[in-house]
Image (cartoon, grey):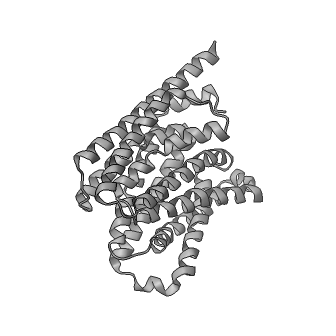
Amino acid sequence: MTSPAATANADNDPLGYAFAVMGAVLFSTKGIFIKLAYGEGVSAEMLLSLRMLVALPVYLVILVTVLRREDKLRRALTLPVVLVSMAIGILGYYISSYLDFLSLNFVSAQYERLVLFTYPFFVLLFGVWFFGDRMVWRVVPAMLVSYAGLLVIFGWNLAVEPDGLLVGTLLVLGSAITFAFYQHLAKRQMLMVGTALFTCIGMSTAGVCAIAQNLIISGPSSYLTLTPEVWGYGLALGILGTVLPSFLMNAGMARIGARATSSTAAFGPIVTIVFAVIVLSEPFTLYHALGTALVLAGSVLFTRAEKRARQQARSLSAR
């Protein structure tokens, strides 16, 4: 369980929150680039592999650099530590990402980001169920508000564009659940090997999985048929939607913890909605506005309720 002192330090770490916010904003552009690439007829497997083809060399270079410079970290890399880091990376950067990529074949970028936005609730629940955190019951109304907002947008989509909506929603929820579980596991692993080293191991492993998957499905020659536009989207996904936000999010998580990091995700849906409307010409109706407002309001209430609960826990422990 997180100590009161550590929690207090997290609450007063503006740099940690800044890292988390910047990571959330950059991650939110991912859906836009994916939708643009899908417009070129690219499969989810190909696009995920392109993302990793761009990102993998960066992580490998950083991995070698860190290992050369940090003797202490190199000694900490026992086989069990490496294997666990690889497994966590596959969960968070391959399985979660693949489910998310698949979902965007069925739902809009706005809706996908709002559903993903509920992952802080799963972070809280998993913390209670599996990692010894205390349940904060006062956040339950906030969770209900956010899910009411999702229900509004789900209802609009069901009436207007029902095809694939349920499948897409389940895929996004699967992505949110696996990413929430990843955050708890990653936080603990980063305490052992450091943020940069863990990120490089986890993302490199996920990259190999994604590239191998596409090679098995489509073969090496499939890359030769891609247009420059598709390669450009892959480059944007690799750098802006993967490399930069992964280090920023993990740096924020290492400083302020998984639950605090998840609370900064409110900036993601706003950025996604703006770009989805401007770039993708997705509709933004009164129902979208109401649903989005409820989701964001629930997030704000969730963050405030959890922060008050942490402050009360510290005051009680100090008595």
| The N terminus, quarter of image | top right
Residue 200 quadrant: bottom right
Viewer-side residue, 241 vs 265: 265
| The C terminus, quarter of image | top right
Viewer-side residue, 61 vs 88: 88
Tell me where residue 155 appears, x and y as whole percent. Answer: 34, 50
In the image: residue 291, left or right of residue 185? left
Tell me where residue 64 appears, x and y as whole percent. Answer: 62, 64
Could you tell me which residue is drawn at 49 percent across and 48 percent down?
249
Residue 168 quadrant: bottom left
- Numbered circles on residues, count: 0
Is residue 23 among what the camera can see? no
Tell me where residue 42 appears, x and y as whole percent. Answer: 40, 75
Viewer-side residue, 310 vs 171: 171
Could you tell me which residue is drawn at 44 percent across and 40 percent down?
264
Could you tell me which residue is drawn at 36 percent across and 53 percent down?
111
Is residue 135 among what the camera can see? yes
In the image: residue 286, left or right of residue 263? left
| Residue ranking furthest to the front | 159
Q: Is residue 130 above or below residue 313?
A: below
Q: Is residue 119 above or below residue 316?
A: below
Tell me where residue 91 appears, x and y as whole percent. Answer: 60, 58
Could you tell me which residue is drawn at 55 percent across and 27 percent down?
8
